[in-house]
Image (cartoon, grey):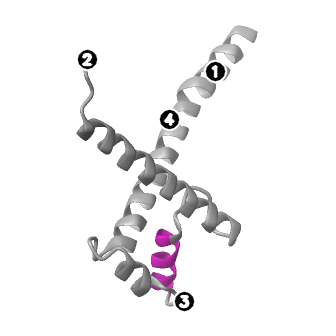
Amino acid sequence: MKRTMRYYKLRTIKYVTRVSIALSVLLNVILGGKSNQTFSARNFYWKIQGRYNVVWLIDRIFWFDPHHCLNSWVYWRTAKNIRKKQFYKEITENYVRKDIIFYKMQE
């Protein structure tokens, strides 16, 4: 199968996007932020809390996405909640039931 130039261009764009997100998370963690939260999401969280932020600057840098920080915060918040719910679901399914079965076997 012959790969076209468009294929390589799309792969490169996806790669650069993933690396950029990773660098943003790294910067945020180095500056004392929460893990898996981008610098943009952290600044929007600060805006909600009424703290000093640079949301206006970040949104201007990403001019093609006028609500970049808001979208980053919403994505981080929903992904965090989904991971949390999935974690508790796995814990209750895998460990609590096994402990109950183990406890019943001991009786």
Q: What amino acid type should be assigned to the residue bearing mark 3?
A: Arg
Magenta region, residue range: 40-49
Give SS at disc 4. helix
Residue 29: x percent and y percent? 66, 64
Displayed quadrant of residue 30: bottom right
Q: How dense is the environment of label 1, judged by Cα within 10 Å: few (below 14), some, or many (20 and up)? A: few
Q: How dense is the environment of label 3, judged by Cα within 10 Å: few (below 14), some, or many (20 and up)? A: few
Give SS at disc 2. loop
Q: Which mark is residue 89?
A: 4
Per the model, the C-alpha gap separating discs 1 and 2 is: 54 Å
Identify the residue under disc 2.
Answer: 1
Q: Residue 50 versus residue 38: which sits nearer the camera?
A: 38
Q: What amino acid type should be assigned to the residue bearing mark 4?
A: Lys
CB contact under 8 Å: marks 4 and 3: no
Q: Residue at x 69, y 14 (%)?
A: 102
How many numbered callouts? Answer: 4
Classify the position of the C terminus by image quarter: top right
**Does residue 107 appear anywhere in the picture?**
no
* Residue 64 on the magenta segment: no
Placement of 97 over or under 45, stated as above or below: above
CB contact under 8 Å: marks 3 and 2: no
Q: Residue 54 versus residue 77: which sits nearer the camera?
A: 54
Q: Which mark sits nearer the N-terminus, 4 or 3? A: 3
Per the model, the C-alpha gap separating discs 2 and 4 is: 42 Å
Residue 53: x percent and y percent? 51, 86
Q: Which mark sits nearer the N-terminus, 1 or 3? A: 3
Judged by depth in the image, the label closer to the viewer, 1 or 3, is 3
Judged by depth in the image, the label closer to the viewer, 2 or 4, is 2
